[in-house]
């Protein structure tokens, strides 16, 4: 990004941000509530259009080439779920295999990898409505990664989670970055996440 700004009415949410996140890194994006962290992630993911300045992710202007950008990124925004309330997690995975047109062998390997890394074996066949907050967050992260995105955006992924779930998520994020080379950008208020 260069000189990135996002304004809502008279309120400047992101003010002249210059940011370069190296490919393959894990990048913590910190700031107080209202500082524009989530707004920045929304601009990087193509959900929001900047008021001014430039933004590119892997050579793509996200809001101009949303479809192409969506295939290259995974996104988990805090408490917003990509899961289907009445479906088991495994059925949601199958749905995303079709939506992203993931080659079956890649899909199968990723399901196995993320089930192990995120310790999801015990709840894959349970409807989402029966899952704990930590289980839902793990499943949301797995869904965001099934198509092997180059970049993963996580907006406060550990908020409200217990100590054990936080530890599993942190270890999984490190492992995914190391094993797949996925660039991870996360916002958080938890210094243990950093």
Image (spheres, rainbow, N blue to C red):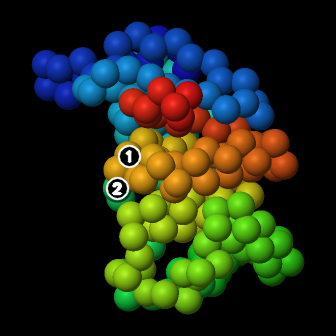
User: Which residue is at a point 65% across and 78% down the rendered structure image?
Assistant: 121
> Observer-nearest residue: 171 or 129?
171
> Relative to residue 87, is residue 32 drawn left or right?
left
Along the polypeptide, which appears first: circle 1 or circle 2?
Answer: 2
> Relative to residue 34, is residue 120 drawn left or right?
right
Residue 61 found in image quarter: top right
Q: Position of residue 105 (x, y in %)?
A: 86, 78
User: Which residue is at a point 52% across and 31% down the rendered structure image?
Assistant: 192
For the residues labelled 1 and 2, the Cα–Cα distance comes to 8 Å
Q: Position of residue 117 (x, y in %)?
A: 71, 61
Furthest toward the left, the residue is 10
Q: Residues within 10 Å of mark 2 (few under 14, many from 20)?
A: some
Asked if 39 appears above or below 127 in the picture, the reply is above
Q: Which mark is residue 2?
A: none
Asked if 16 appears above or below 39 in the picture, the reply is above
Asked if 169 appears above or below 31 in the picture, the reply is below
Q: Which mark is residue 159?
A: 1
Furthest toward the front, the residue is 163
Q: Which image quarter holds the N terminus?
A: top right
Q: Position of residue 135 (x, y in %)?
A: 48, 68
Residue 43 found in image quarter: top left
> Observer-nearest residue: 6 or 21?
21
Could you tell me if residue 51 is visible in this image?
A: no
Q: Are marks 1 and 2 in contact (CB under 8 Å)?
A: yes
Could you tell me if residue 144 is visible in this image?
A: yes
Of labels 1 and 2, the one closer to you: 1
Per the image, the residue denoted by label 2 is 79
Helix, strand or loop for disc 1: loop
Residue 12 found in image quarter: top left
User: Which residue is at a point 73% across and 68% down the rendered structure image?
Assistant: 116
Q: Position of residue 176 (x, y in %)?
A: 74, 50
């Amino acid at each position: 990004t260069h000189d990135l700004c996002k304004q809502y009415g008279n309120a400047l949410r992101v003010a002249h941000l210059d940011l370069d996140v190296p490919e393959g890194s894990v990048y913590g994006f910190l700031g107080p509530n209202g500082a524009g962290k989530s707004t920045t992630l929304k601009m990087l993911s193509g959900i929001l259009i900047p008021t001014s300045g430039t933004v590119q992710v892997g050579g793509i202007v996200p809001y101009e080439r949303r479809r192409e950008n969506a295939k290259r990124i995974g996104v988990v925004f805090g408490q917003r779920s990509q899961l289907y309330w009445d479906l088991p997690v495994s059925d949601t995975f199958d749905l995303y295999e079709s939506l992203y047109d993931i080659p079956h062998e890649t899909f199968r390997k990723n399901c196995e990898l993320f089930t192990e890394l995120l310790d999801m074996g015990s709840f894959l066949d349970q409807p989402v409505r029966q899952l704990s907050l930590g289980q839902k967050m793990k499943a949301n992260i797995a869904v965001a990664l099934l198509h092997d995105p180059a970049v993963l955006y996580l907006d406060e992924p550990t908020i409200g989670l217990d100590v054990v779930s936080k530890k599993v998520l942190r270890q999984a994020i490190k492992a995914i970055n190391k094993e797949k080379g996925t660039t991870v950008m996360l916002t958080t208020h938890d210094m243990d996440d950093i």
